[in-house]
Amino acid sequence: MMKKMMIVVALVAMSATAAFAQFSYGVKGGLNFSSVSNMDKLLGDNTKMKPSFYLGAFAEYKVNDFFGISPELVYSRQGLAADVEMEYLGFEEEGDVKTKYRLNYLNVTVLAKFYVLEGLSVDFGPQFGFLLSSKLYMEAGGEDETEDMKDTNKGFDLSVGLGLTYNFNQFFVQGRYNLGLTDVAKDNESDDKFRNNVIQFGVGYRF
């Protein structure tokens, strides 16, 4: 009887260890290259992607060797940059207004991870963004101006992410494209929708 109980306890312990081994967590960060769709209709044709960064934490539970689920909590600086001609803005002077439109989000992502090769996963899932701040930075003729734009933006943003992750033991590298599905502008009555578009390249570490 005692031997059977010891075998059962050992099996339960082994099962718990195996289940725990499927769970991991860690930190990640990297570069953002972001833009906002249709902003060229407001700022002219010289809009461009704005480089910035993201930083956050993640967890992952591998259901089996081929599939896992990974929630993330990430601080992400997004937006766009533009060199806007002063004439386009209605000024008589010549030259450009260097503009940066910064949208800072706290993003919650839930990814389905499909392991197509050993260590390589295709990642897909929704991203729920909560706006922390929104500012417009302008510089022309040696003068700077900053305007708070949070009241003109929606506080929630829905995106979908698609990317790849390659694991090197505890370290990994990944690339992802986050496509915005919702209009970031509040009370937008035009037919043009302003959606976030973000390309990410980063690294991470599993504890």
Image (tube, grey):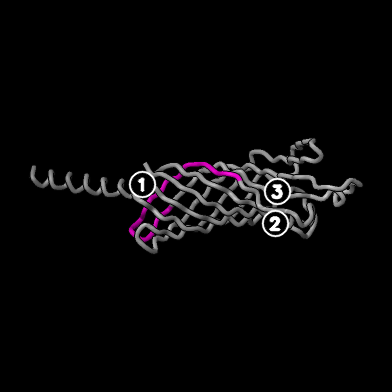
- The reply to whether dot 1 and dot 3 touch (C-beta < 8 Å) is no
**Gap in Å between the C-alphas at discs 1 and 3?**
35 Å
Is 82 or 167 nearer to us in this picture?
82
Q: Which secondary structure lies at badge 1?
A: loop
The mark that comes first in sequence, 1 or 2, is 2
Amino acid type, label 3: Ala
State whether the magenta stretch is mostly helix, strand or loop: strand
**Gap in Å between the C-alphas at discs 3 and 2?**
12 Å
Residue at 45% over, 60% down: 122
Q: Which mark is residue 170?
A: 1
Is 95 or 80 nearer to us in this picture?
95
Is residue 191 rendered magenta in the image? no
| Apparent side of residue 136 relative to residue 78 in the rendered image (left or right) | right
Can you give x and y, in whole percent of width and height, for residue 203 in the image?
Answer: 46, 47
Per the image, the residue denoted by label 3 is 81
- The reply to whether dot 3 and dot 2 touch (C-beta < 8 Å) is no
